[in-house]
Amino acid sequence: MNRRTLLAGAVLALGLAGQGMAQDEPVKAGFIFVGPIGDGGWTYEHNQARLAVEEHFGDKVETVFQESVPEGADAERAMTQMALGGADIIFTTSFGYMDPTINVAKKFPDVKFEHATGYKQADNVATYSARFYEGRAIEGLIAGKMTKTNKVGYIGSFPIPEVIRGINSAYIHAKKANPEVEFNVVWAYTWFDPAKEADAAQALIEQGADVIIQHTDSTAPLAAAEKAGDVIGFGQASDMAEYKPSPRVSSIIDNWAPYYIERIQAVMDGTWESGNTWDGIGPGMVEIGEITEAVPAEVKEEALALKESIASGEYHPFTGPLNKQDGSAWLAEGETADDGTLAGMDFYVEGLTGEIPN
């Protein structure tokens, strides 16, 4: 064997060794969070899922995260830094990150991006969300059955379809449980601001609401309910169990861990593809937290029956007959809403008062 052959063999061996090392390198998964990981709600659950990823994969995965990233230009900078830092996949976990995610993904075609609750996709951008409105139906039933004043307060974050769907679903099922019920919606224009959330809850309580439903991320509304006394509420995005058995009488829990594990595994396997995932109670992405003893037994039984019928697909929370707020027909008897209408929902159902802000 001549020197040239020996040299070629050594180069080939080094190349193969390098390939092996590259394969052994951990997948780097990044997470961009809109709130602090200690918010007790939305971001807390996303971070719990990140920790579950670490536990599941061990040293095969490295995770990095940045918390309390404002929606907009700050988010774009954070994503860019994460991509430059070697992230293989980046989860951007708030609706307002949609355009920044698309913008950054164009600059990093080899990085996979996953955007939560949005609708814009690309070859390297997938979207995912949960059918939170299924959980709102159960909260609405409990609210309608338990209110003594017939007034339910609802704290909305931003007037986007996800939030509007939740308001409508809760109202429909509260009204079925109690035809006298009224909803008062207050828009906080924030995902996480405990002071604003507390003020919103207090204003609703002063207006007579004895049930508070929230689509904001802190425990401040539950704290306001506890302080007021004889007011109940629900955990949002996380169990918020520190307020059990009352005022927190149940909760919607977002279970992201199985999805994150599945998508990171796809990156490892080289099978990741863009797409949209929208799962609910049945697949386990939406969980209903313990319904406490503060809820009458017969109401709990009804709520659990509703949960099971939704999970099995036997019942859809948006089933006609339903009209829009202006009285125009929307769904006929037995007709169910299609996903396209739900995804772009920009109207209230009949019976809700007030206007949806632009």
Image: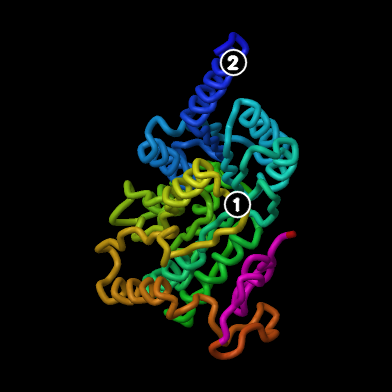
Determine crowd level at label 2: few under 14, some 14-19, many 20+ residues with C-alpha closer than 10 A. few
Mark sitting earlier along the chain (2/1): 2
> Measured from the top left, where is residue 35 in percent x and y?
54, 39
Tell me if residue 125 comes above or below residue 206 in the rendering. above
Q: Quadrant of the C terminus?
A: bottom right
> Measured from the top left, where is residue 176 in percent x and y?
46, 81
Residue corresponding to mark 1? 273
> Measured from the top left, where is residue 110 in percent x and y?
66, 38
Q: Does residue 211 appear to the left or right of 1 in the view shown? A: left
Residue 5, which numbered label?
2
Q: Does residue 356 appear to the left or right of 135 in the view shown? A: right
| Magenta stretch: includes residue 237 | no
358 and 33: which one is in front?
33
Q: Helix, strand, or loop for circle 2?
A: helix
Farthest-out residue, bottom:
333
Q: Amino acid at mark 2?
A: Thr
Q: Amino acid at mark 1?
A: Glu
Q: Quadrant of residue 310?
A: bottom left
Q: Residue at x 64, y 65 (%)?
A: 343
263 and 211: which one is in front?
263
Magenta highlight range: 335-357
Residue 340, which numbered label?
none
Determine crowd level at label 1: few under 14, some 14-19, many 20+ residues with C-alpha closer than 10 A. some
| Magenta stretch: includes residue 354 | yes
Q: Quadrant of the N terminus?
A: top right
Tell me if residue 313 comes above or below residue 58 in the rendering. below
> Measured from the top left, where is residue 178 in percent x and y?
44, 80
Q: Residue at x 55, y 32 (%)?
A: 66
Q: Quadrant of residue 328?
A: bottom right
**For discs 2 and 1, the disc positioned in front in the rendered view:** 2
